[in-house]
Image (cartoon, rainbow, N blue to C red):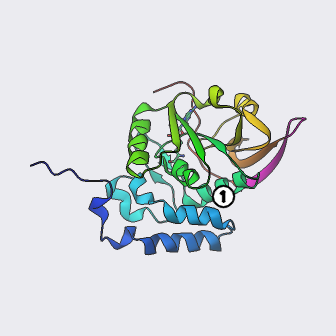
Amino acid sequence: MIHKRKLGEENRGIGMTSPGTRGRLVERLRAHGIRNDQVLKAIMQVPRHEFVDEALSSRAYEDTALPISRGQTISQPWVVAKMTEALLEGGAMQKVLEIGTGSGYQAAVLAHLVPQVFSVERIKELLRIARRRFHALGLHNVHVRHADGHLGWPSQAPFDGIIVTAAATGIPMDLLEQLREGGRLVLPLERDRQQRLLCLEKTAEGFEETDLGGVIFVPMLSGLE
Ligand code: SAH
């Protein structure tokens, strides 16, 4: 008989992936300035070890970025928390768009906070794995699409908020257009060879910018893989 392993089964009983370990990560994020309890609660609810290779699962609750396949990374938990917190400060959100599904972790955190999450990824293989994870975790409010995120997801616009999880070299204007007025675009932007995490709030005249500090993200690329 073939024994099919369910997601996570291999990690059961290993201390490094226990809820206690996850709780310590949440305390660390709080100590490092994350104030939004809803965001911290969502991070407590998402098993980050399910979003990395089994070989890395013992490091899943360290506050660091980790490699996923195809030369990409799962973002550092603090960065996920910071971006999510900045997004939610824009008020109640119904519909949020993420660019760069990657492992699916950021989308899974959003899925606990927002009724509808849309996520776009340009590497088909990553999307396939992420989709399986959403399904296994019962996250039925995450909708994914294989596309170039520079174009957003026009048929679902307008969004209350948009998070970009790869570093752009200019503000993607299509994304700004797909945001409702008062909505927020949170993205790492490369300027003078330095990446800054920005929060742009859309106004009637354009947008207001807040700089949230220096970050390191993989680059936002064009086209599909
Ligand atoms: N949010 C992810 C972070 C993954 S790293 C997580 O939580 O794991 C950034 C991802 O952005 C990569 O998977 C990369 O393939 C994707 N990406 C880069 N440029 C993109 C583009 N133009 N459109 C869609 N996805 C893109």
| Residue for point 42% across, 41% down | 131
Residue 209 x, y percent position in the rendering: 82, 46
For residue 199, side relative to residue 123 (left or right): right
Residue 119 magenta-drawn?
no
Tell me: 157 left or right of 3: right
Which residue is drawn at the image coordinates 69% and 69% (left, top)?
A: 33
- Judge left or right: residue 27 versus residue 52: right
Indicate yes or no: mark 1 CB to ligand 1 under 8 Å.
Answer: no
Q: Please say whether residue 193 is visible from this viewpoint.
A: no
Tell me the magenta residue range. Answer: 203-212
Residue in view at x 32 percent, y 56 percent: 54
- Picture layout, residue 209 above or below residue 30: above
The C terminus: image quadrant: top left
In this rendering, the count of numbered labels is 1
Residue labelled with disc 1: 82
Could you tell me residue 27's position as x and y percent? 57, 74
Name the foreground residue: 175 vs 154: 154
| Outermost residue toward the left in this view | 1
- Residue 46 on image: x %, y %: 48, 59
138 or 168: which is nearer to us?
138
Which residue type does callout 1 highlight? Lys
Can you see residue 100? yes
Please, is residue 33 above or below residue 204 in the view? below
- In the rendered view, would you say 17 is above or below 208? below
Placement of 74 over or under 97, stated as above or below: below
Q: Quick one: which residue is furthest to the right in this view?
A: 205
Q: Position of residue 15 (x, y in %)?
A: 35, 73
Name the residue at 44% across, 37% down.
Answer: 127
